[in-house]
Each structure stands twice: as structure tokens, then as C-alpha cells.
Image (spheres, rainbow, N blue to C red):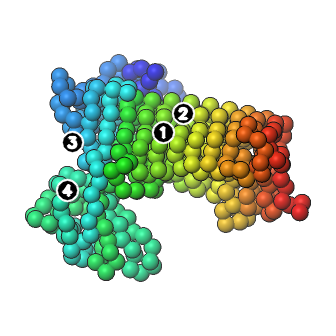
Amino acid sequence: MGLSRRDWLRNTGAGLAAAWTAAAWGVDMPKVTRPRATSGDTAVEPVWDERLVMTVGPKEADLVGTTDRVLQAAVDYVVRLGGGTVKILPGEYRLRNAVRIQSGVRLLGSGVDSVLIKEASVETTLAADSDWFDQELTLENPDGFRVGDGVVLITKNPNNGGRDVAKRTLIARSGNRFKLDKAPRMNYWKEMKPTVSTLFPMITAEETADFAIEDLVLDGNRANNANLDGNYAGCIWLQDCSRVRIHGVTARNYNGDGISWQICHDVSVEDCHSHDNAGLGLHPGSGSQRPVMRNNRLERNSIGLFFCWGTKYGLAEKNMIADNMDCGVSIGHRDDENIVRDNEIARSGKNGLLFRPERGEGYTAKGNLVENNRIVDSGPEDGVAVDIQGVTAGNTLARNEIRDTRGPAKRVGIRIGAETGGNTLQDNTVEGFATAVEDLRQG
């Protein structure tokens, strides 16, 4: 079940801001006993019994339609009136661009009956150069591109050889010339073979806080879309956001990540099902602080749960992480002080749990607690259930059940790398392997 209307209002916007205002000042402030709405005061406000609810659907709704345009119109209208709920009625909705969430909005579906599907992608090259300050593109083949489409521009950087990526919207057209919503701020020159594709995250937000995405199905139509990785897109993709609730969402079939958030803090992902995505099931991205990932099912992705760079103080608890092609859980670059507890990690393609080697001393994960997990049937015949690589040190693995039910073959329960530092292994059950614990430091 999702939050009630009163719970949602209490836990978003002013309600959340008020919780930390006095602490931020570092003084014992008088308690606000009679809150009133005061012009400009975003920290203290009454908990209103009702805010605006806008319905969207194929019929008998406030806004009738089944496209990203009608969904975005409802979000924008609710924002203009100070926040509230966009209720997506049962139906199938086709997206040619991302639905962009704003602060104070609750995007609420009707469970499995509200299905958002990404339209098939098309791709072309540029017929003319576009400099970093230009706000238009000339497409070699404009077939399949429309005004209003979300697009991604990808090119090789002419100076350093790296990849430059920009996400934009097509807002005007004359023949094969399209105006962008804003300039790319990078050079897209024909000699570097740039491409333009109708790729975008299905639901997105940037530099936004206090919002929720709940009870709906997002289908990335993977078979008919090119790949765009989780640094730029996913069924849900967030950048520089805070205090976010994602609940009861199915994120499936995206040619990239299921749910990805980058430099986002206090993100809660609960009771979601992220499956059959080409990339990562859940991707708490670089610099994200205090993520909570609980009671999710992460199935048949490349990696189930990927802690990116500098993800700290997070909790991954009671998730079912099964049949992922690479790792069940991957943790590495300065991912510190996280708790991975009471998860089922089953039938991973390579490792159930991987501590990545990263660049060496000072870069690996430390201070993490991995406890009471059940890690079963990891990898091929020479698979490793728990692989601690590089100079990783300072982590605790306690009371985990690490088993293989398929016969020992050449499988290893826990492998400790040759350069690995001190980690605590305490009261773990390791059964069914050719080697229970392989410590490469000893040989």
C-alpha cells in the first residue's frame, strides 16, 4: 500500500523541511505550535487535509489522453497550484519523451493497470555540423523524428577522444532541420560521426526534491530501442534530487537501467520489481547518500544492485535478487558504511556478491556490514559466491548463508584476493563448494 494522502502531505515539502531547519541552525529553537501559511516560508506550514488531485486517462479524466504530453501537462498544472497528485487511471500510455517530475508532486498510478511504454527508437547521423552554441540540428534522415520528441546526441569529443552525450527535446522543425530546447554546449561535428536517437528516461527529475513515483508499470520496450546506459537514462532516472519515494513500481525491459539515481540523497525504493533490463536493476549512483532499498525484486538484469561511486550510509534489506546475468550485488569505489542485510541473492551469472578492486588503496569500499543474507548457486562451474577483490578492507561479513546446491565442481564460497586487507568474516555458513574459503594471500 502507498502512503495515505495525509501521510504524503506530512512527509513532503514543508513537512520534511521543518524536520531539519532547527538542527541546521544548531540551536534550540522554540517549537512551532500553531503553524500558518506565511508568504515565503517553505520550512513551516500546516499539514493540509487536501491538495489538488489531477486525473489522467483514456476517458473520463480531468485530462484525457494516453501520451507523455498529457501526463506532463497534468504534472505542470499541479505544480502551478503548489503541488499535489497526478493520478494515472488504468490504460496504456505511449511515451515519445520523458515525463519530468517537479517538487511536491506525487505521480500515482493504478497499479498493474497503468502501463507506460516507451515508443521504438530511431537513429540517424547529422547532415551538417552543429557547434556547441548552435540550437539546431540538421538530420541526415529525419524519418521517425517529430517535434516534441526526446532525443540523445552522442559524439566523440574532438579534443580528448571521449564520449559527449546531451539529452534534449526537439521543439521546432523545417524539413530536416530541428530546433532544440537548448543548445548542446558541445561540438557535434560530422567528422566525429555524431548520432541522434529518440532515447530518453521514461520518468525523470533533475535538481528536484520532495516527490513520489508510485504504483505503476514502466516498460522500456527493449527489443525496439537502442541502448542508453544508466548514467543518462532508465525507466526512472534522477539527477541531483533529494527526499524521493519510489514505491510499487515495475521497471522492466529497458535497454539500460531499471531505476537509476545520480547524486541523489534520501531516496527510498520499496516494493518495486525491476526486471529484464539490459543494465542495472537498482543503481544508487555516484555520491548518493542514505538510499533505502527494501522489499524489492531485482531479476534478470545485468547486475541486480550496483552501488556506484561514493554511495554511503545506505540500507539494502529484504530484497529478492535473482537470476541476474553478472552479479547479484556489486559494491566498490568509496562505497562506505552501507548495510546489506537479509537479502536473497540467487543464481547470479558470475558472483552473488562482488567487492570491486577499483584503483587501489583509498578507493575501495570500507565499513560495510553484510549480514544475514542467503547467497545461493552463484556463477558457473568455477563461480565464486562472494569475491573480495583488490585491497578491499574494513568490511564485515557476518551470519550469511552461502550455499551451492548444484554440486561443488570448481566453485568457491568466499574468495579473498591476493592484495586484500583485513575484513571480518564471522559466523558465516559456507556449504556445497569445492573450496569454502579461498585465501589467495596465503599462497
Which of disc 1 and disc 2 is earlier in sequence?
1
**Label for residue 144?**
4
In the rendered image, residue 1, in percent from the top left (x then y), is placed at 46, 21
Could you tell me the amino acid type at mark 2? Asn
**Any part of residue 166 in sight:** yes
Which of disc 3 and disc 1 is earlier in sequence?
3
User: Which marked residue is nearer to the observer: mark 2 or mark 4?
Assistant: 4
Disc 4/disc 3 C-alpha distance (Å): 18 Å
In the rendered image, residue 77, in percent from the top left (x then y), is placed at 22, 36
**Label for residue 296?**
2
Residue 146 relative to residue 52: left or right: left
* Neighbours of disc 4 within 10 Å: few (<14), some (14-19), many (20+): few
The answer to whether the residue labelled 2 contacts the one labelled 4, judged by CB atoms less than 8 Å apart, is: no
**Dividing the picture into quarters, in which one does residue 180 lie?**
bottom left
Q: What element carries label 2?
A: loop
Could you tell me the amino acid type at mark 4? Gly
Q: Quadrant location of the C terminus?
A: bottom right
* Neighbours of disc 2 within 10 Å: few (<14), some (14-19), many (20+): many
